[in-house]
Amino acid sequence: MKFRYKIYGPGILRPVIPIEIIYKNESVPYEVLIDSGADFCVFDAEIGEILGIPVEEGERFEVVGITGEKEPVYFHFLEIKIGKCRYEAKIAFLRKIGPYGVLGQKGFFDKFIVKFDLLKEEIEVKPRK
């Protein structure tokens, strides 16, 4: 699957792709940043609540982000759909994450081979076999 980098301003390109998040019989589209520096996938808690997930009943863990402040995240298992590929992953939900979620090492890079080509403004994502 190939995706285009998303433009966020003059000279600002980010590897943000569309996905679908599925929980039970509900699904929502969501945009996510492919971030090789992220340990795991993190989505906005609001998205989880829209899907009917009792977010704060999940496995609690504290993370330290770019601000240096500790924030709680709550892990849940759910399905992710990227293109035609569906898979289950353990996802962390965080309050006030920003304009998009994050696909990280566990839950994304362990499931896909990813090629970034900034000059072509293209990201290629292939499921692992």
Image: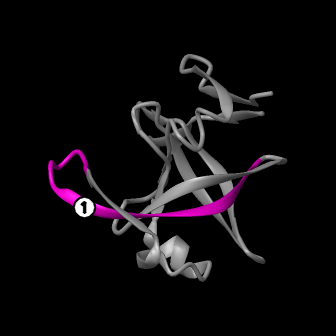
Q: Identify the residue shown where x is 44% and y is 71%.
A: 45
Give the image location of residue 78, x and y in percent. Answer: 65, 62
- Tell me which corner region of the image, top left, top right, bottom left or bottom right, holds residue 9: top left
Q: Would you name the residue on which mark 1 appears? A: 71
Where is residue 60 drawn, in percent x and y?
36, 65
Residue 87 x %, y %: 74, 50
Q: What residue range appears in magenta?
A: 64-82
Q: Is residue 105 magenta?
A: no
Location of the N terminus by quadrant is: top right
- Residue projecting furthest to the right: 84
* Residue in the foreground of this view, choosing between 129 and 10: 129
The magenta stretch spans residue 66: yes
Q: Is residue 23 left or right of residue 42?
A: right
Tell me the quarter of the image containing the C terminus: top right
Q: Nearer the viewer, residue 64 or 75?
A: 75
Q: How is the image coloured?
A: one colour
Q: Is residue 117 left or right of residue 99?
A: right
